[in-house]
Amino acid sequence: MIVKKRIVIITLITVTLLLVPLIAMQFTEEVKWTLMDFVVAGVLLFGTGFLCEIAIRKTKNVKYRIAICLAILIVLLLIWAELAVGIFGTPFSGS
């Protein structure tokens, strides 16, 4: 029961975060996200939350939990930055 509740919370947080650019698109021309942008962002955000949930559930040591979740968040930020502006210059870069 608690696991389902946590998954619902992760989903609600993901949807809430995705509402920010959706609402911004209504008021300015500077935010131009496509459906694919929302899908990729949703997968990244939900995946990060889900992986942190798995790490919290499977790891007993609190220090390891924090370290694993921090590593997952750093990977999220690096992927997000690469997709947005291309800090590594891969073919997936946004610039």
Image (tube, rainbow, N blue to C red):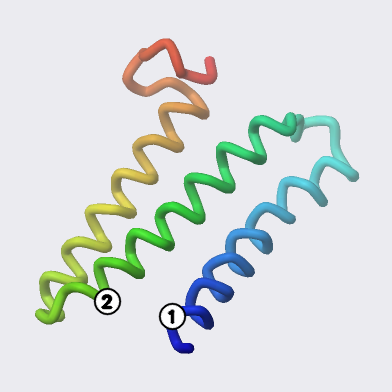
Q: Which residue is mark 1?
A: 3
- Please state the horizontal and vertical placement of residue 59, each as a whole percent of the image: 16, 74
Marked residue nearer the N-terminal end (2 or 1): 1
SS at badge 2:
helix
Q: Residues within 10 Å of mark 1 (few under 14, many from 20)?
A: few
Place of residue 37 in the rendered image (x, y in percent of width and height, measured from the top left): 64, 33
In the image, 21: left or right of 47?
right
**Residue 57 tag number:** 2
Q: Residue at x 59, y 60 (%)?
A: 14
Q: Secondary structure at mark 1?
A: helix
Using the image, determine if residue 82 lies above or below residue 59: above
The residue lying at 74 percent from left, 55 percent from top is 19
Residue 57: image location, x then y, percent: 27, 76
Q: Is 80 rendered above or below residue 60?
A: above
Q: Position of residue 48 (x, y in %)?
A: 40, 55
Comparing 15 with 58, the one in front is 58
The amino acid type of the residue labelled 1 equals Val
Verify CB contact (< 8 Å) between mark 2 and mark 1.
yes
Distance between mark 2 and mark 1 Cα atoms: 9 Å
Q: Tag count in the figure?
A: 2
Left or right position of 55 against 13: left
Name the residue located 36 percent from the left edge and 13 percent from the top edge.
89
